[in-house]
Amino acid sequence: IKNSESDVKIDILEMNGTLIKSFSNKAKEKADQVTVRAGGNRFVWNMRHPGYKTFPGMVYYGSPNSGPKAVPGKYKVRLTVNGESKEHEFEILKDPRIETTQEELQMQFDFLVKVRDKVTEANQSVIEIRKIKEDLGYVKNKIGTEPQYKDLNDAVKKFEEDLTIIENNIHQTKNKSVQDPLNYGIKLNNQLAFLMGEQGLGDFKPNKQAEEVRVDLTRKIDGELLKLRSLIDNNVEHLNRMIKDKGIEMVMVKSDPKKM
C-alpha cells in the first residue's frame, strides 16, 4: 500500500464468486473496517459469515452476533486498492483433532444459516413496525385532537395497538440494557438467536432437539409475520385514503417486512 489514504477493500468469496463478506478502510461499521498504513499490511479473517441483522437499541440475552463459521474448503479473496483488483485462492483446512465429518460440518453450517436468516427476518419486522409507528406519530401530531379527526385518530390508535402486540410477541421491548433480560423473559427473535449461538459453539451437526426448537420457533415467527403482513395490508391503504380525504399532505408507505 502506497499510503494510508489509499482506498482498500477486501472481499471474501465462494469459489463461484458469491460474496461472503467485504471489509474496507472506508466502511462505516466497525466490524467491516480494516486499518491501512503505508507499506505491508496484515489482515486476518475470522472465517465467519455475516451475522443476523440488528436494529438500534436491540438488547439480546446470551446471543453474540457471530455468523456461521465457513465450512472447510476452497475460497477466494479479492484485494482492491484504488480500483485495481487481484484475486487469489485459499483453503480452510479441517481441524485434524475433531472427528466431525465434512458432511456434518456442512449440516451445521446450513442449520445456522437458516436460523440466522430467520432472526434477520424477525428483526426486520421490528424495524418495519417502528417505521410505521413513526409515520403514525407524525399523523397524530399533525391532526391533534380536533373533533373532525376523531375517526382518523381512532383508526391510528387501533393500528398502533395492534402493531405493538405483534412487536412485543417478536421482541422483548422492555429490554433496554444488558441487565434487563434478567427480569424480562426473552421473546421469539432472541430465543432463536440464542439457539444460533448455542449450536455454533463447537464443530458438530445439529441434534434432534435443536432442529425441533428451530422448527417450532420458526413456525411461531412466521405466524407473527403473517399477522403483520395482513395487518399492514388491511390498514395502510385505508389510512392513506382517510388522510387524503382529510386534506393532509402525507402518504404512508406500505412494505412487506419479509422482503425488507
Image: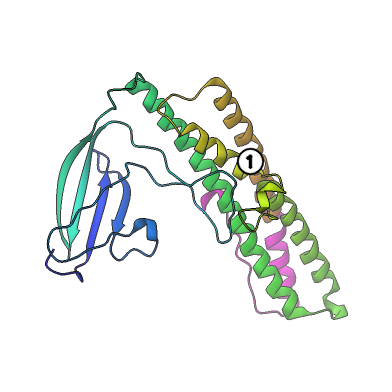
Disc 1 crowd, CA 10 A, few/some/many (<14, 14-19, 20+): many
Q: Which residues are magenta?
A: 233-260
The residue that appears at 88% across and 79% down in the rendered structure is 147
Q: Nearer the viewer, residue 227 or 42?
A: 42
Q: Residue 120: image x %, image y %?
A: 52, 47
Above or below residue 233? Residue 134 is below
Q: Position of residue 234 (x, y in %)?
A: 72, 55
Q: Where's the N terminus, which quadrant? A: bottom left
Which amino acid lies under the numbered mark 1 shown in the image of this protein? Ile
Question: What is the x, y in percent for residue 129?
Answer: 64, 58
In this figure, which residue is indicated by the disc labeled 1? 221
The quadrant in which residue 247 appears is bottom right
From the viewer's perspective, is 114 left or right of 166? left
Tell me if residue 51 comes above or below residue 141 in the rendering: above
The residue sitting at 60% across, 44% down in the picture is: 190
Q: Is residue 256 shown in magenta?
A: yes
Which residue occupies 28% across, 27% down?
94
Q: Nearer the viewer, residue 183 or 106?
A: 183
